[in-house]
Image: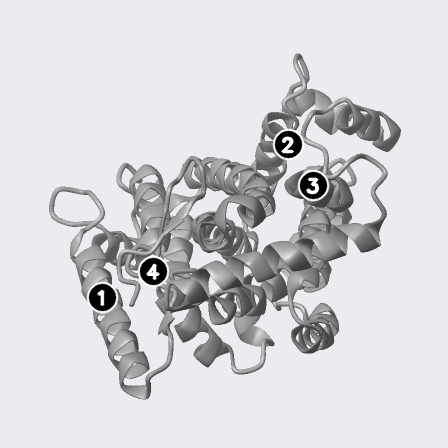
Amino acid sequence: MNRNLFPELFPTDSPAVVETYNSAFGDAIATHLAVPGVTGEELATMSDTEFVEVIKSSERQPLNPITIARETLGLEEGTPVIEIMAGFKKAYQDLIAEYEDNGVDGRSALLNASNLIGHTEAYITGYSRDLGRLTNKMVLLDASYKMPTRWLDKIWVPQEDAHDRLWSLMMGGLSDDDMEVFYKDHARHMQIGVHLPVTSILPTQTYLMQQEGSTVPSYGNTAALYGPVLRKPALRIREDEARHRREYQAVTKKLMEVDPDAVVVAIKNEFDNFAMPGKDGIRNYNSKQFDALINGILDPVSILEVQIPMINQLIEKAVVKTKDAKAAQGALLDEKGRYSLDEKASRELDLASRRERAINKATKKGSLIPAIVGVTVLTDKRSGELTFPMSK
């Protein structure tokens, strides 16, 4: 490793952290690809050509948006895209009619999903730009440190790009006016991106672990709004996001073994300040986020369910030494050394209060009650069938 470059490139990361980061990514990629007999160490020594061939043999290829869309609607292979778009439009209209028949504003719920989940997916260009800066620094340190770069270029970006294209295709079910607004914003978001801190590996890594973790329940909640047909693409995307979360967490766990003080502080900072990437560019983000919270898409309780095991697994056994790290660990854990449930209880009360206010506001205006997962709308987890216990 060229240690003379190190202070300029990574002023806060030790050589051991950089080396562990790269090695852990090799193991994470091997797990992600799930190709029998291929280890992270073997992946790290492969040429780019060999690496691409291994990816081709993996069952976990990027989603084919057209194929998933066609299968969702039960259409035959070779069905033209224009017919798939028409099929999505009919499925949307049928779903919205079901909501309205039960006194629920389904159109608003679906638009909220597109505003936040769909547009967040459009940030992939910004992700790759900022993460690329970080991984390129590693290549400058040592040409053999290429696993994070390979993950970015050959696996993560193609999968996220496929999510973006699938979500854009799903938006074909909206009205023409809604589609025009969606695509206009979509193009704008692709140009903005999200600016992650890239002066150090650790804040970027802990942010991505948290962001990917948050998308898992968000896609599950979105799927619950979409009924038995349209929920299928959201659930397929969630499968990828769940793997990404596990892999980023595995890398963070390895980093914890090398520099627990820095990782604990980074996790605490992200826990306190985390926001989905759309916050940096989506118009009226706070208002749309509030609507999505009411609709159950960005339900803080379900997102907290992701944070709790992550914090317990990574932090409870960490042996930290610095004052800042001890303060961060103490703030996240209770006296028994586990994540305190007081925060969860507080969020549950807050969410319940917000939903109650939203229902009262909608009722006073004589408008349709907002679609609220688990309150006005329930979904059978297996079939996706909707029920409306609070329908008018």
Q: Which badge, 1 or 2, is on the more N-terminal residue?
A: 2
Expressed as whole percent of the image width and height from the top left, the position of residue 360 reads 24, 79
Residue with the most extreme front position: 101
Instruction: State the residue position of label 3.
Output: 68
Decide: is 26 above or below 333: above
Task: Say which mark, if any, is on residue 300.
Answer: 4
Asked if marks 4 and 3 touch (Cβ < 8 Å), the reply is no
Amino acid marked by disc 4? Pro
What is the quadrant of residue 349 in the picture?
A: bottom left
In terms of depth relative to the viewer, which is nearer, 184 or 230?
Answer: 230
* Residue that numbered label 1 is attached to: 352
Separation of residues labelled 2 and 4 (CA atoms): 30 Å
Q: Earlier in the sequence, mark 4 or mark 3?
A: 3
Quote the CA–CA distance across marks 1 and 3: 35 Å
**Amino acid at the residue labelled 3:** Ile
Quadrant (top left, top right, bottom left, bottom right) of the N terminus: top right
**Mark 3 or mark 2, earlier in chain:** 2
Instruction: Of the two numbered discs 1 and 4 on the same chain, state the one appearing first in sequence.
Output: 4
**Residue picked out by circle 2:** 29
Badge 2 amino acid: Ile
Contact? badges 3 and 2 (CB < 8 Å): no
Q: Which mark is residue 335?
A: none
Q: Amino acid at mark 1?
A: Ala
Q: Secondary structure at mark 3?
A: helix
Q: What secondary structure is found at the residue carrying circle 2?
A: helix
**Disc nearest the viewer among 4 and 3:** 3
Q: Residues within 10 Å of mark 1 (few under 14, many from 20)?
A: few
Looking at the image, is mark 3 or mark 2 nearer the viewer? 3
Mark 2 or mark 4, which has the lower sequence index? 2
